[in-house]
Image (cartoon, rainbow, N blue to C red):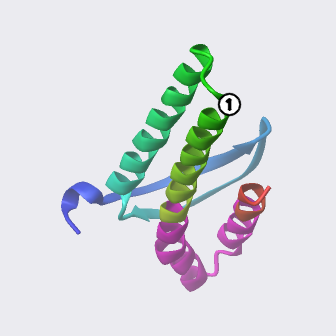
């Protein structure tokens, strides 16, 4: 792991969903795969841009759906990387320090991801 893939931030942050603040807490975030997440996001954005162009050109619906499947796959990949980092670092730290709020927030995030 090189230093370009590592980001360390300690900050208080507020979680917002549907315009309502869920809660605020402070803990250290260690993200070891920032570059991988950014690359995967770029891939998803590229696929989505391609879908937009396909729709604008009136391309075949089946081709659009296949491209949308690629977008979904890219987004799922981003989620997996972020979830792994979160479990490996933030949740491990939360368990060590007794931060039950972080675990509750993870449960809430998983619920939203699974919808």
Direction left: furthest residue: 2
Identify the residue position indicated by label 1 in the image: 61
Circle 1 — which element? helix
- The secondary structure making up most of the magenta span is helix
Q: Residues within 10 Å of mark 1 (few under 14, many from 20)?
A: few
Question: Residue 96, position in %: x, y?
Answer: 55, 85
Residue 48 picture quarter: top right
Direction bottom: furthest residue: 96
Nearer the observer, 78 or 68: 68
Residue 59 picture quarter: top right
At 76% from the left and 62% from the top, the residue drawn is 108
Question: Residue 87, position in %: x, y?
Answer: 54, 74
Question: Residue 57, position in %: x, y?
Answer: 57, 14
Nearer the observer, 45 or 100: 45
Say if the magenta span includes residue 112.
no
Q: Quadrant of the N terminus?
A: bottom left
At 36% from the left and 59% from the top, the residue drawn is 8
Q: Quadrant of the C terminus?
A: bottom right
Q: Image check: 11 left or right of 9?
A: right
At 50% from the left and 55% from the top, the residue drawn is 78
Image vertical order of residue 43 relative to residue 114, above or below: above
At 36% from the left and 47% from the top, the residue drawn is 39
Say if the magenta span includes residue 90.
yes
Question: Residue 56, position in %: x, y?
Answer: 59, 15
Task: Give the magenta-colored segment's residue range.
Answer: 82-109
């Amino acid at each position: 792991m090189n230093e370009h893939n590592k980001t360390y931030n300690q900050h208080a942050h507020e979680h917002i969903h549907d315009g309502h603040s869920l809660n605020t807490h402070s803990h250290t975030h260690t993200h070891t795969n920032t570059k991988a997440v950014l690359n995967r996001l770029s891939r998803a954005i590229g696929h989505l841009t391609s879908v937009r162009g396909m729709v604008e050109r009136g391309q075949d619906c089946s081709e659009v759906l296949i491209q949308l499947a690629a977008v979904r796959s890219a987004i799922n990949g981003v989620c997996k990387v972020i979830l792994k980092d979160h479990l490996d670092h933030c949740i491990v730290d939360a368990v060590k320090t007794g931060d039950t709020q972080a675990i509750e927030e993870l449960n809430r995030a998983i619920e939203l991801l699974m919808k």
